[in-house]
Amino acid sequence: MRDIYRGEVICPVCGHVQPKGERCRYCGSHLYHRKPNALKWGIIYSLTAFAFLIPANLLPIMEVIKLGKVYSNTIIGGIIAFLEDGDYFIAIVIFVASVLIPFLKLFILWFLFGVAEFDKWKRYRRVATNLYKFISFIGKYSMLDVFVVVLMVSFIQFGNLAEIKAGPAVIPFGLAVIFTILATEQFDPKLLWDKGGGKNERS
Ligand SMILES: [Zn+2]
């Protein structure tokens, strides 16, 4: 791929092809072949997101105050409560949006980093490119994850329960969502198609 341009770069902002340099001679934007430090920041952001997902799942996502007693539920606890009540649809929606997708996005990102970095993984680059499109696509709906948590709380509010509050897990959950978006944004899919771990064209 890099052979096409032979020392020339496409400005990432205005799209003009020009000789390599610090800044675009047309619009003055910073020029690069690949997003600078895409892997380094991708790894940092994704590990941060993973670290936040742990308290997000272990701490209570909501607290229910009923007849003076406080009951708290984690995400998994909430899912189990819905299953026990026979609300399978809500249980599945919450599981997919709050547990499955957040972890799946991170595992996919780590796979992409592997394909970008290791020559032996290059044979998976077509699969990796499709997975990248997939997480970029679902990334647009990332706030849905947070929305589902809010939905879970409000659904229960329709019951005859006294009072419901969002639990402390809401904060790490929101941060995990944000850092996953940052890690995805930071990744440059062209790295999947570079040879030699993409090192030769990173500037
Ligand atoms: Zn430009």
Image (cartoon, rainbow, N blue to C red):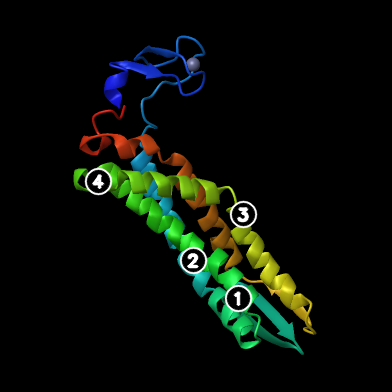
Ligand 1 near label 1 (Cβ, under 8 Å)? no
Along the polypeptide, which appears first: circle 1 or circle 3?
Answer: 1
Q: Nearer the viewer, mark 2 or mark 4?
A: 4
Q: Nearer the viewer, mark 3 or mark 2?
A: 2
Q: Dot 1, crowdedness within 10 Å: few (<14), some or many (≥20)?
A: many
Q: Nearer the viewer, mark 4 or mark 1?
A: 4
Please tell me which residue is depicted at 54% across the width and 55% down the height of the picture: 177
Q: Secondary structure at mark 4?
A: helix
Q: Is residue 18 above or below residue 157?
A: above
Q: Which numbered dot is residue 143?
A: 3
Q: Amino acid at mark 3?
A: Met
Please tell me which residue is depicted at 61% across the width and 84% down the height of the picture: 81
Spatial distance from mark 1 to mark 3, Cα to Cα?
A: 18 Å
Q: Is residue 110 above or below residue 55?
A: above
Q: Amino acid at mark 2?
A: Leu
Q: Quadrant of the N terminus?
A: top left
Along the polypeptide, which appears first: circle 4 or circle 1?
Answer: 1
Q: Horizontal placement of 24 versus 82: left or right?
A: left
Q: Amino acid at mark 4?
A: Arg
Q: Secondary structure at mark 1?
A: helix
Q: Nearer the viewer, mark 3 or mark 4?
A: 4
State the image coordinates of residue 3 (x, y, percent, origin top left). 26, 21
The answer to whether residue 47 shows anywhere in this view is no
